[in-house]
Amino acid sequence: MGERIVVGMSGGVDSAVAALLLKREGYDVVGLFMKNWEDDDNDAYCSTREDLIDAAAAADVIGIELEAVNFSAEYKDRVFAEFLREYQAGRTPNPDVLCNAEIKFKAFLDHAIDLGATRIATGHYARVSQKNGLYELHRGADASKDQSYFLHRLNQSQLSRVLFPLGELEKTEARKMAAEAHLPNHAKKDSTGICFIGERPFREFLNRYLPRDPGAIVTSEGKRIGNHIGLSFYTIGQRKGIGLGGPGDAWYVADKNMETNSLVVVQGHDHPRLMKRSLRAQDASWISGDAPEQGSTHSAKTRYRQADSACIVTRSDEEGIALEFAQPQWAVTPGQSVVLYDVAVCLGGAVIS
């Protein structure tokens, strides 16, 4: 048998194809299904049971063993608790970024080593290479599916033990491979949204854990035009669910004033209050271990579904970074990650403050 690789199998087509490719290359492949949430896994929105069945069926066709492991305690402590703290502070966190750093490439990696593996693999669309003795994280070849944004907090130790078999593939190629191999999940719809929320209404979920603290909805001029249910339940750039109608352009959330407990809204997608030329970010994580130098130029994105934008680092120190963009950025949101790139290389990022 070849080198043992443990593949994180979610029940989806991408991780199944990752396992299939490694098996064909002669590795000793073991599938690992991670259960990260169990507070309400019996309701209509949770797909854990169905996903485990799909992962087991795919593993059977591939001809590998599948183990299920429960990381829900670690997830609650390391990811979900931070998620709630951020929302209570008025920010909008990205738990998928934290989940990758703390669960999929830490708790999972530790468990895989205990199983005798030398490396782990996932179905992410990203690539790893080495240059001058350092590991680099590169974008996936399929630009529309590239997931390096979510992986930007990985460090040298983690990247040294990770394989991304789909990094060079287009998504259409992965689905074609799955169909040709008769994998039962070859046509399964991609999962969307935050893993522990599933397809449930987001506000309904938050309402279970966060108290409502109603306040005023005000215009950028300070005029009160409505009431909100609590600042935690809104995010910058939000259009739907504000509860404002009337003539003119649609209303968007432009700011949250925690001191006055007021929600600031503006009319029109391109209102100046929604456009920012600069930002500050903290809690930085750099893949090489070194922060970018002040005055250096890069491209960056402030949210996943966004084209890169040219920027310059105006401050870089142990507290974080400050960036200035060549073009105004829409709805820059505290709590989200700003991720820096040099062409295809992901340098790392920080949490927008």
Image (spheres, grey):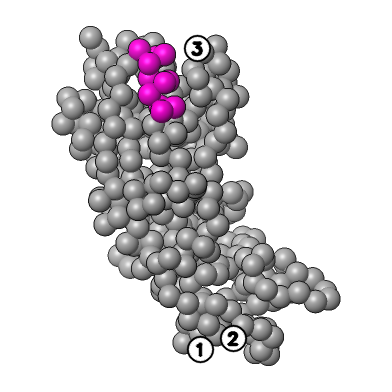
**Where, quadrant-wise, is the C terminus in this rendering?**
bottom left
Q: Quadrant of the rendered structure where residue 51 is?
A: top left
Which amino acid type is shown beneath numbered disc 3? Ala
Q: Is residue 59 magenta?
A: yes
Mark 2 is surrounded, within 10 Å at the Cα level, by few (under 14), some (14 to 19) or many (20 or more) other residues, namely many
Q: Residue at x 40, y 58 (%)?
A: 350
Report the front residue among 273 and 76. Answer: 76
First of labels 2, 3 by sequence position: 3
Write down the region rendered in magenta.
53-63
Q: Disc 2 and disc 3: Cα gap in Å?
A: 57 Å
Which mark is drawn over residue 150?
Answer: none
227 on left or right of 135? right
Residue 260 disc label: 1
Mark 3 = which residue?
Answer: 181
| Residue picked out by circle 2 | 216
Marks 2, 1: nearer the viewer: 2
Disc 1 + disc 3, Cβ < 8 Å: no
Q: Earlier in the sequence, mark 1 or mark 3?
A: 3
